[in-house]
């Protein structure tokens, strides 16, 4: 790692070393990843949080309203619960992959991220890990949704809805849909943690986060 100094805006960044920047970004990512996995990878982690709760997509959400009006609301609720439970069961598997990605961040990348937007670190993290995480999540989500017979009905109805333009093609398969929404939720919560760190690095109690993100 380099040890040169880089001029960054704000007095706390004026003498920030490159190695410090890398260490700070890695610490921010680790804190965000651990917090997100801890919040989401448990019962009601998704279902009980409106920010990440997985709902039926597009036209199916409207159709669900009609089903509830005809007394079939229990079936709709069962499907929504199953989707969220599947996401909750998949998220803990993300931790090893996230940790490996954190370790691979270069000094040059770290410097750009420190000076980036409120979610620059999270956005970078997403670009690096979303695809391999999706591959890891999909079989877990598939096993979880196979336990619910409603999943097959979802796929049948969603396929027809997609043909009518009521649902996006990629949302017509429940396993793919839940996997993508689980990833959305994961990076949403990592982003929430990053914003907290940037807004109040002193409050984290971490010397390196205070040094790198303090202004």
Image (spheres, rainbow, N blue to C red):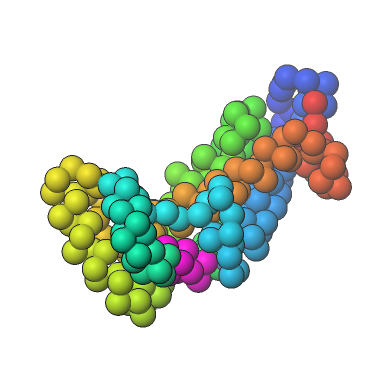
* Quarter occupied by the C terminus: top right
Looking at the rendered structure, the number of numbered marks drawn on it comes to 0
Residue at image position (64%, 43%) is: 192
- Say whether residue 88 is magenta: yes
- Say whether residue 1 is magenta: no
Query: As drawn, is 114 to the left or to the right of 70?
Result: right
Displayed quadrant of residue 42: bottom right
Residue 116 x, y percent position in the rendering: 60, 28
Vertical side of 4 occupied by 105: above or below: below
Residue 167 x, y percent position in the rendering: 25, 47
Residue at image position (45%, 55%) is: 54
Between 115 and 61, the residue placed more toward the observer is: 61
Residue 114 x, y percent position in the rendering: 66, 33
Between 5 and 136, the residue placed more toward the observer is: 136
Vertical side of 106 occupied by 40: above or below: below
User: In the rendered image, is residue 9 in sight?
Assistant: yes
């Amino acid at each position: 790692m380099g040890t040169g100094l880089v001029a960054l805006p704000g007095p706390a960044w004026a003498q920030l070393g490159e190695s410090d920047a890398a260490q700070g970004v890695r610490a921010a990512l680790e804190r965000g990843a651990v917090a997100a996995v801890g919040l989401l990878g448990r019962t009601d982690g998704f279902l009980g949080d409106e920010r990440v709760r997985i709902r039926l997509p597009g036209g199916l959400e409207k159709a669900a309203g009609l089903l509830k009006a005809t007394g079939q609301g229990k079936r709709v609720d069962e499907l929504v619960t199953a989707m969220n439970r599947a996401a909750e069961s998949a998220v803990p598997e993300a931790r090893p992959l996230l940790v490996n990605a954190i370790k691979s961040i270069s000094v040059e990348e770290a410097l750009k991220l420190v000076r980036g937007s409120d979610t620059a670190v999270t956005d970078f993290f997403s670009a690096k890990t979303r695809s391999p995480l999706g591959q890891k999540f999909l079989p877990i989500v598939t096993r979880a949704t196979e336990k619910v017979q409603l999943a097959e009905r979802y796929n049948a109805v969603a396929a027809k809805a997609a043909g009518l333009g009521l649902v996006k093609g990629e949302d017509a398969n429940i396993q793919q849909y839940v996997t993508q929404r689980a990833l959305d939720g994961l990076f949403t919560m990592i982003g929430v943690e990053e914003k907290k760190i940037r807004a109040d690095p002193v409050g984290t109690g971490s010397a390196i986060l205070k040094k790198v993100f303090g202004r």
